[in-house]
Each structure stands twice: as C-alpha cells, then as structure tokens.
Amino acid sequence: MLIKIGLRGRILLFFVALAAGAVAALAVGLWFGYHREGSPDMLNAFVQGAVAAGFLILALVTWIWFLFDTHVARPIDKVASAMRARAHADVEQDFATEEARYLGDLAAAASATAATLAQTRGALAESVQRETARLSSDKNKLEQLLADVPPAVLLCTGRHHLVFYNGVAKQFLAGSQRPVCLDRNIFDYLSEGPIRDAHHRLLESADRDAVVEFICLSPCGQRRLAGRMRLAGDNGGDGGAYVMTLRDVTTEVAAYGRRDVLLGDVFLQVRPAVSQLRQLMTGNGEPQVAGDAIRRQIETLDATLDALEDRFEHCRSDGWPMAPTDARELGSQLHRELQGSGLSLEIEAAAVAVRCNAFDIVSLLAHVVSRVNGTTSATAFQLAISEAGDAAEVSLSWSGGSIPQEELQTWLGDPVYEGGVTCETILKAHGNALSVGLLGDRPCVKTRLRPIERLRSVGTDLSRHVVYDFDLLSRMHYEKLSDAKLDALTFVVFDTETTGLLPEQGDEIVQIAAVRIVNGKRVKREVFNLLVNPGRPIPASATAIHGVSDAMVADAVSVQEAVRQFHRFAEGAVLVAHNAPFDMEFLYRREKEVGLRFLHPILDTVLVSATAFGRAETHTLDALASRLGVHIEEDDRHTALGDAIATADVFIKLKDMLAGQGLVKFGDVLASVRSHQRLVRDLNDPQAHAS
C-alpha cells in the first residue's frame, strides 16, 4: 500500500506517526507519574500539562515536517524528476541545484551523473552521426528520387493503413475530404473494391513476386487511376503489406472514349450513305432522278465526312504527349531559345495553364521567329498569351513589315527540329492553325491552344518530399484502447487562438492548428493550420497576444467549416492539448451545428506533467518547455501552430518519462492522470463532456 504513495506522502505519514507516538508517550508518562505520586487534587494539573505539552509536541513536529518537506522531500522529488527527464527525455541542461542545497552532495552527485550521461550520449551520438552521414546522404537522395518519380508510390500494411507516400501520391489523394496522413486507411482516399480484390489475388498467388494491375477511382470520382500492386518484400513481419503505384489515366480513358465514339459514328453514319448510293447506282430508276439522288447523297456524305474530320482533328492530340504548362513558362522557354541570336523578345502572358507539348510549341514559335526575321529583318518581337474563352490566344508580333498568309502556309511544311517533325504536324497534333493578323498596329502570327485551366498555388504540403514510417509495418494492433501502448497510438496535438477566454459569452476561434504524432514521433509534413473567421470583431487585446487581426481572417473559412476540417484531420486519433478543457469547449459548442461529435480520447499535458513531475511543480507550457529543453521561438509563442508544435514536443518527452515510471499503456496513463483531476477536469468522462 505504501509503495503507491509518493515520497512526500510517506514522509508525512512518518511525521504523523512520530507526533502520535510522542503524544502517546507523553500521555503514558504522565499517567504513570500520576498513579505513582499523584493525588486527586493534581489530576487537573496533569491533564492541563498533558494538553499543553501535546499541542507543543504537535506544533514542533508540524514545524519540523514543514521544514523537512520544503527543504528535503520536495527537492528530492525535483531531483528525481530532473534525473528521469535527463534519462528518458533527452534533456541536457544543467540541474537547478539552488533548491536542493540542504541535500548535501546529492544534488551535485545527481548533476554530475546527468552530465556524464549527457557526455556519453553526446559522444555516442557523434560517433553514430559520423558513421551514418553517408547513409543519411544516400537516404536523402533516394527520398528525392522517390518524390520525383511520375507515378504515385504508396506502401500499406496488410490492414490497408498508409506507411509511405510520396508527393505525387499526396496530390492524387488530395481530392478526398480527408487530409492524407500516415496510418490512415487507404480506403479513405480510394475505392475499396478494386484494391481489396487485387490484394486478395496477391495473397492467394503462389508467386510472391506477382504483380496485379487494376483500375480504381478516387472517392470524389474525378480521377481514374491505373494501379500496380505487389507484396512488399521487406515487410517487417507483416505478410500482407504491399507496395502500390498509381497513374492518372483519366485523360487517356477520356481520349480513348472520344476515339471510340468517333469510330462508331463513322460506321453508323457513313455505312448507310454508302449503302444507299449502291442501291441507287444498281437500281432501274430514271437516270436523271437517280443522278439527282446520288448527287444529294454525295453532298450529305461529304458534309458528314467534314464533320467527322473536324472531330478527328480535335482527337488528333489525344495520342500526343502533352501536359499542362504555365503560359508564362512557354514565354520563358522561347526567350531562352532565342538567346544568342541577336533577337529580343518581350513577354506578356496570363497566369493560366495550357495543355500542350511545350517543347513542340516553343520549337514552332522559334521557327516562325526565325522565318519572320529572314523575311522582314525584324529583330524585336513580342509574345502575348491571353485568355479567349476556353482557349489561350497566342500572338507573336514584331516591328517591321508584314507577311502574306500564302507565305506563312509555305512554312508549314518546314521541319522545326531533327526528326522531320514539321510545323503542320505540330499544329494538327494540337488541333489548331496559324494565321496572319494585326496586334494593334503591329503585324503578328496568331494561334490558339486549348484547353486551359486556372493555375493553383502549390502549397508546401505538395512540395518534393516523401512521408514514411516503416516501423508501422511491425506495430501491434490492439482491440482495446486501454491495452494499447502509447507509441501504438496516433495523437493529434492541437491548439486554438480565440477572440477571448469566454466561449459561453460569444468568444470564437480565430485560428486552429494541429500536428500528428505517429509511432511516438512527430510527423513534420502532416500539419493542420487554419485561420478562421469568427463572425465577430477580434478585440485589439486578443490581437496583441496572438497576432491574428480582422484583416487576416476576412476571407478565412467559417468556424463551422474549420471544425469540420479539424474533425477530419483528427479522425481516429487521441487528442492532446495543453489545458484541454478550454480548447475543447470551443469545439463542443459547435457539435450540433456541424452534425459531428468529438468522442476522441483526450490527454491534457497539464495532467500528464503533474503525473511526471508531481502536482507541486508549475505546469504552464513555458515552464514545461524550459524544464524539458523544448525551444519555442518568441515569434511562434501564442500562435496556434507554434504552441501546437511546442506542446507536441513536450508531450513526447513527458510520454518517455511516463514510460520510465512504468506507465506505458494508455489505460494506466489515464488512471494516473485522473488522480490529478483537481488541476484540470477529466474530459474522458462522458458526464464532463455532457456538462
């Protein structure tokens, strides 16, 4: 029983026992003296003396206990917590020995031990770093290569949870309502049937190197993806783990569909006309009547062939290698192409993307510039690319004489680069033509490129990177949450900035940010950070703290949409926050509006800190960061993302300290933090949520 009581509690019990023993000894002594020599008249004197002495003994013992608790017990607890932090949480800063000055050499010895441990770790880390520098460099190169390969690459566990994905995969899967994150189910992003079928076929195959191909859809149905799947060779003990590559074939399938429809229409429309002509030519009718009928059929057939040819011209580009290209990049490439030729080029391009073969189009324009220069001696050119409906109008103008359309047509048979590809071939492949015109008062050559699409800014989350944790392949799966080890759980650590501290009086969220901890490590690429329009003015006093102003949130999402997006980001995870009841209250108040419930398990780093360091310590985020060696930039403090990252790093170190105390299961940690409910109410209690 005493083992479960802390050091200070045991010392308190010791002094209570000492006081009780002293009072009992005093009572026995006075009782014995009274019965030896005392008379009934002295009874009151003995009782009064016993009471006075008893109170003096209690006061003396209490005073000594207070001094012992202040100068011995508490410092011992602090030294123990500090040593545990340095043993398990990689804290390297020196001991604060001032409070432990009454412990003799204990604090100095503990500090020396911690310093020696830090030096040993440092030396070992330096040695390991030297030995792994080359491997790290090779690893980074491989990551860059995997990030740049055209297909999406994913590695999944046998339970279909993500272990690895590259930047292309994130772009492919980003059309889903859920953000792409490690340890999430692949069926959150792709249609389930084809993937399960391919996986079952691999598991049933006798060939471990077999490859299965399949077609699947994104949940929104906008992407059709061609996939290849094979079982992972080095699978960490998960025999069902598999590698999957995906390629977007939406455009290809649409192109094949258009060509199939075109060919079908050729047979459907041309064959009946040919049959009628045959009947007319072999019939016994009047020659004049038959001639008129044949003429009409020929005219109809000719019009049908013209229409089919026009459709074919639009389909011609389907088999040509093309990709969306920034119109401004086309201008930059043409400018580079003309460097060294003595010709100048001004560029005025709209911020749109055109689907084309950029090399061919630039080569075509460079060829036209060369021919115009040879014909008119013009040296100053201007390239203008502007929107024109569903196309981009490309105008190449110059200062000098004009050229006739007939001469332009003669250039179309010229090869534009080695291999015999002519201007006409490139134009037909893109379904367009060249024409002579005027741009203001300057002669120009015009063409059109289609289709166009709006350029979207590419965020940092779609940059060249890969995200992975191969340890997920060997991580155990637990049926009961309470039995799961902390490192087997996924945590979402979040923080909010608000208009004020009183949600019940109308204060709202202005920013919410979160990071994910998977397999005991913070995933740096998986970040949620959202400015929120609170629907009310932000007080200047609040802006002075977190820096979020009315202008910053004018075009931001609503509170309801922010809560929905955060719920999707945190799906299936344990929520972690510092002083969680405050942040959760803003989310709970919106549950009915958005039709969602935050039923996630919740850990509060205030309570976790009280478990690791004791209730008497200070548990503010700044104090924890300082105690655990977590650095917070001044500009990041009191921003939602900065505080969320700091809380996550603090939580990881606290988690390691709890493991050093033997608290490794979630249920054990939850039971331990509940003993400190007086600091912060327990949000894992349904009644607390309901209130």
Image: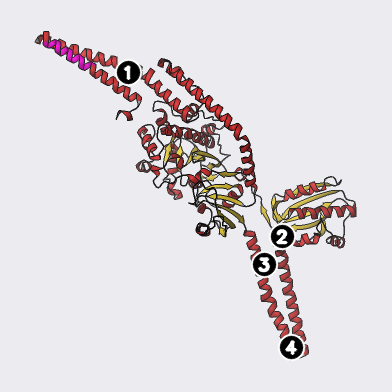
Which is more foreground, mark 2 or mark 4? 2
Q: Badge 4 is on which residue?
A: 282
Q: Badge 2 is on which residue?
A: 320
Q: Which residues are magenta?
A: 22-35
Q: Secondary structure at mark 1?
A: helix
Horizontal side of 412 relative to 506 (left or right) equals right
| Mark 2–mark 4 CB contact (< 8 Å) | no
Q: Quadrant of the N terminus?
A: top left
Amino acid residing under circle 1: Trp
| Mark 1–mark 2 CB contact (< 8 Å) | no
Residue at the left extreme? 40
| Nearer-N-terminus badge (1/2) | 1
Query: Could you classify mark 4 by the number of other residues whose Cα lies within 10 Å: few (under 14), some (14-19), or many (20 or more)?
Result: few
Viewer-side residue, 467 vs 457: 467
Amino acid residing under circle 4: Thr
Q: State the residue at coordinates (39%, 25%).
A: 616
- Mark 4 and mark 1: Cα distance apart in space: 125 Å
**189 inside magenta stretch:** no
| Nearer-N-terminus badge (1/3) | 1
